[in-house]
Amino acid sequence: MKKHKSIIIFLLKFFVTYFLLVSIYNTYLQKSQKKDNFYQTSSITAAVANQTVDVLSVFNYNVKAAQHDKEMSVKLIIEGKYTARVIEGCNSISLIILFVSFIVAFSGSLKATILFSILGSVFIYVVNVLRIAFLTVMIYKYPNQVGVLHDLIFPAIIYGTIFLLWVLWVNKFSNYKK
């Protein structure tokens, strides 16, 4: 039992953190999304779409975000063409929850755990907005490559970022570092 104690503690910390954060997030989604007579995405999903518009505007793209009227998403319209959509799964919150749960499970000092969780979450959020902006432009320019872009390259960017942050955490800051 002693040799499995650290594994059990890791799993408990991970799952308790994960389920607590997912419960909070799901409560937020239930209160912020509407689909009665019209669709309204959560404010965080709308914010990600609007921040994507802001990024693309810096690069002189004529782009706007508009609530989709037939589904729970925000349309990204670039140069007058509906090019992409931002759904709840694109806003990075689910990935940030997974990231933070791992950091807590492999915790270091309280200060380091909190700081790395916050800074890492902000970094993931920013990378995600930049990733969506880049994806929108690439789909606009190369519409025949949407499958490769959306299903392979762009998940690799966000998951790769999270994996590298986890490696950095475990090797530099957690109590498990060598």
Image (tube, rainbow, N blue to C red):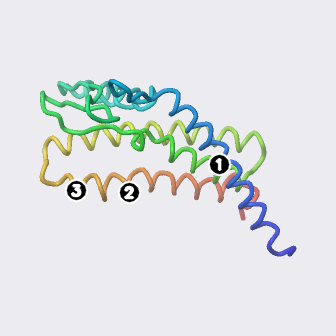
Q: Are there few (<14), some (14-19), or many (20+) residues within 10 Å of tag 1?
A: some
> Which residue has dot 3 on it?
147
Residue in view at x 30 percent, y 57 percent: 151
> Which residue has dot 1 on it?
19
CA gap between label 2 and label 1 equals: 25 Å
Tell me the quadrant of the picture where the C terminus can be found: bottom right
Is label 3 in contact with label 1 (beta carbons under 8 Å)?
no
Helix or strand or loop: what does disc 1 sit on? helix
Helix or strand or loop: what does disc 2 sit on? helix
Q: Say what amino acid the circle numbered 2 marks.
A: Ala
Helix or strand or loop: what does disc 3 sit on? helix
Residue 86 coordinates in the image, percent (x, y): 33, 37
Q: Earlier in the sequence, mark 3 or mark 1?
A: 1
Residue 75 coordinates in the image, percent (x, y): 26, 32
Q: Say what amino acid the circle numbered 1 marks.
A: Phe
Residue 117 coordinates in the image, percent (x, y): 63, 42
CA gap between label 3 and label 2 equals: 13 Å
The quadrant where residue 89 appears? top left
CA gap between label 3 and label 1 equals: 32 Å
Residue 109 coordinates in the image, percent (x, y): 78, 46
The quadrant where residue 136 appears? top left
Of circles 3 and 1, the one toward us is: 1
